[in-house]
Amino acid sequence: MTQTSENVTWLTQEAYNQLRAELEYLSGPARTEIAAKIAAAREEGDLRENGGYHAAKEEQGKQELRVRQLTQLLEHAKVGEAPAESGVVAPGMVVTIAFDGDEDDTLAFLLASREYASSDIETYSPQSPLGSGVNGKKVGEDAQYELPNGKKASVKILDAKPYSG
């Protein structure tokens, strides 16, 4: 099966293992726990006025959504080392850009899945407007992306280096 680079999520082995463990927990023990909560709440009586039952069902829905998200993410994950330092923006790289040609107004961010976000550096998804605008561009090139108001913004790629954690 061929996948486009837009669907691929770059992950380190550590991040992949953490997400896989979360998926296994949510798919196994967590499902059993929520089923027990729902059964206990159901025994309390009238379901139309049973706050515990409705809360447990809502929790179950959120949990199942997270299971689907993790499953899709891990199916499309590329696990391994950071991309090579080629001067071309790709997922797994720290990208430095300048807004509207003003080289003093810069932003450095990690181009990666939001699942990989950390407090160390701001993270933009390759599917986000800015991420898709810069993905594949070379250092020195200009990139455009669409703002929420529908207007286009332009940035210049100043640097692109593999993320080292």
Image: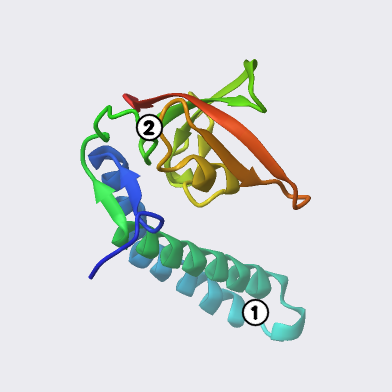
Q: SS of the residue at dot 1?
A: loop
Q: Residue at x 55, y 38 (%)?
A: 143
Residue 79 in view, yes or no: yes
Closer to the camera, 110 or 21?
110
Q: Residue at x 25, y 67 (%)?
A: 2
Q: Amino acid at mark 2?
A: Met
Label 2 sits on residue: 93
Quadrant position of residue 4: bottom left
Left-right relation of 29 to 144: left
Residue 26 in view, yes or no: no
Q: SS of the residue at dot 2?
A: strand
Q: Quadrant of the N terminus?
A: bottom left
Left-right relation of 46 to 95: right
Q: Quadrant of the C terminus?
A: top left
Q: In the image, is residue 110 above or below residue 69?
A: above
Q: Are marks 1 and 2 in contact (CB under 8 Å)?
A: no
Dot 2 alpha-carbon crowd within 10 angstroms: few under 14, some 14 to 19, many 20 or more: many
Q: CA distance from mark 1 to mark 2?
A: 53 Å
